[in-house]
Image (cartoon, rainbow, N blue to C red):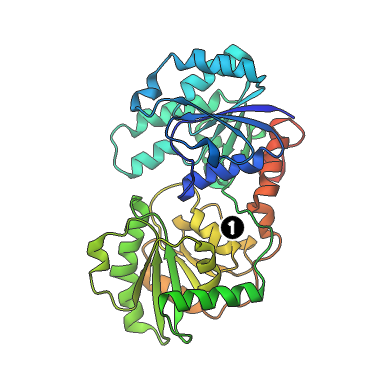
């Protein structure tokens, strides 16, 4: 068993949103196969970590990213803990990771959650190209590279000049290894409709997210301004669009949108994934994998997504439960919603081989120990 020192340079504990959950759950499950010591910022709660040690040694200040004295702190921790590997979450602390790994003889792993340079380019930041070259520099100096989905990995292989045998897909995952059964779905359906006052004959179209995140907010605007007007004009069925999550702007909730229900923050969002009829995912911006889509399919919820929103989720894995339209084609998106209502059957058992943490983290642990590349590395 290796001893892995990880650097997480931002708040993620307790994990509340998709990106934070992606890191917290990765280490929760990865630590079943490798010993993990996580170095992170002061604004994290060590008690929220499951299965691994958390050391709050990084400042919350933005200046932490250029503080050279962290080298001595991390070198000391690496030696005291007997670390064999160092994992960087995102490339931002790449200079520090490269420095510490070389000084201590550690294997360096870069765990990428986006192509960060391209993400900032899409947001119109003038300095994106500087970050892109830095990101390339960090990845090229890593012994192993984890990517959030195959598209990112292929991009990095082609544009960063990485060696395929050093790369693997390490996607966002779920903590259950099979689709919910009919009785569980029935109870969730009753709960959702009772709590939100939705009639039995009304189709529930569901979307959730953190709406202080620009891609989710733009997706919500598309639902209100594009998709719902088309449904109001065309739909031959009764429906409600249920929106859940934090940070929904008051101006949207007060906009008088017909057939839209504002569910707000829901403590047990899994019950809503199980109880809805169709998950709609009109997220046309942002990189990485859309965690909400993975959770929807993992709960056996038929999903309709634009192409950008489905990156990293191959429809061939989904047994007909994922329908994908082109970004911005909202008439076509509504066509797919109408088709999705009639979809029956379950997400195949093989889907969980791609997204169940117990499988994916075991594969990652074996990969960095050189015991096999796993199917994603091929």
Q: Which residue is mark 1?
A: 314
Give the secondary structure at mark 1.
loop
Residue situated in front as seen by the camera: 141 or 186: 186
Furthest toward the front, the residue is: 47
Furthest toward the right, the residue is: 371
Coordinates of residue 250 in the picture (x, y in percent)? 25, 62
Q: Residue at x 65, y 57 (%)?
A: 176
Residue situated in front as seen by the camera: 95 or 178: 178
User: In this view of the protein, can residue 267 be seen by the observer?
Assistant: yes
Instruction: Categorize mark 1 by other alpha carbons within 10 Å: few (<14), some (14-19), many (20+).
Output: few
When the figure is inspected, residue 316 is found, relative to residue 109, above or below; the finding is below
Residue situated in front as seen by the camera: 181 or 347: 181
Q: Residue at x 35, y 39 (%)?
A: 120
When the figure is inspected, residue 331 is found, relative to residue 81, above or below; the finding is below
Q: Residue at x 53, y 73 (%)?
A: 275
When the figure is inspected, residue 70 is found, relative to residue 355, above or below; the finding is above
Quarter the C terminus occupies:
top right
Quarter the N terminus occupies:
top right
């Amino acid at each position: 068993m290796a001893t892995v020192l990880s650097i997480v340079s931002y708040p993620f504990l307790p994990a509340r949103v998709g990106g934070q959950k992606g890191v917290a759950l990765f280490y929760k499950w990865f630590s079943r196969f490798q010993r993990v010591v996580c170095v992170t910022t002061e604004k994290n709660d060590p008690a929220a970590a499951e299965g691994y040690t958390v050391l709050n040694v990084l400042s919350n200040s933005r200046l932490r990213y250029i503080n050279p004295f962290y080298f001595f702190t991390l070198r000391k921790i690496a030696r005291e803990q007997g670390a064999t590997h160092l994992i960087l979450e995102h490339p931002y602390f790449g200079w520090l990771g490269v420095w510490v790994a070389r000084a201590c003889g550690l294997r360096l792993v870069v765990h990428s959650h986006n192509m960060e340079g391209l993400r900032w380019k899409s947001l119109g930041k003038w300095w994106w190209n500087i970050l892109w070259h830095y990101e390339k520099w960090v990845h090229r100096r890593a012994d192993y590279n984890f990517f959030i989905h195959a598209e990112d990995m292929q991009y990095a292989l082609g544009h960063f000049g990485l060696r395929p045998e050093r790369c693997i897909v390490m996607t966002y995952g779920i903590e259950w290894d099979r689709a919910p059964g009919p009785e569980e779905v029935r109870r969730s359906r009753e709960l959702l409709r009772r709590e939100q006052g939705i009639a039995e004959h009304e189709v529930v179209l569901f979307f959730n997210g953190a709406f202080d995140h620009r891609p989710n907010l733009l997706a919500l605007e598309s639902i209100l301004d594009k998709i719902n007007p088309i449904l109001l004009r065309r739909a031959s069925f009764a429906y409600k669009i249920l929106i859940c999550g934090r940070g929904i702007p008051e101006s949207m909730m007060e906009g008088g949108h017909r057939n839209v229900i504002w569910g707000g923050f829901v403590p047990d969002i899994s019950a809503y994934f199980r109880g809805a009829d169709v998950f709609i995912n009109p997220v046309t911006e942002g990189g990485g994998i859309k965690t909400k889509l993975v959770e929807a399919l993992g709960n056996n919820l038929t999903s309709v997504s634009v192409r950008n929103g489905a990156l990293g989720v191959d429809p061939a894995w989904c047994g007909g439960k994922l329908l994908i339209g082109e970004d911005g084609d909202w008439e076509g998106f509504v066509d797919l919603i109408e088709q999705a209502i009639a979809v029956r059957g379950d997400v195949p058992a093989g889907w969980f081989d791609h997204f169940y943490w117990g499988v994916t983290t075991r594969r990652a642990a074996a990969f960095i120990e050189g015991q096999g590349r796993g199917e994603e590395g091929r």
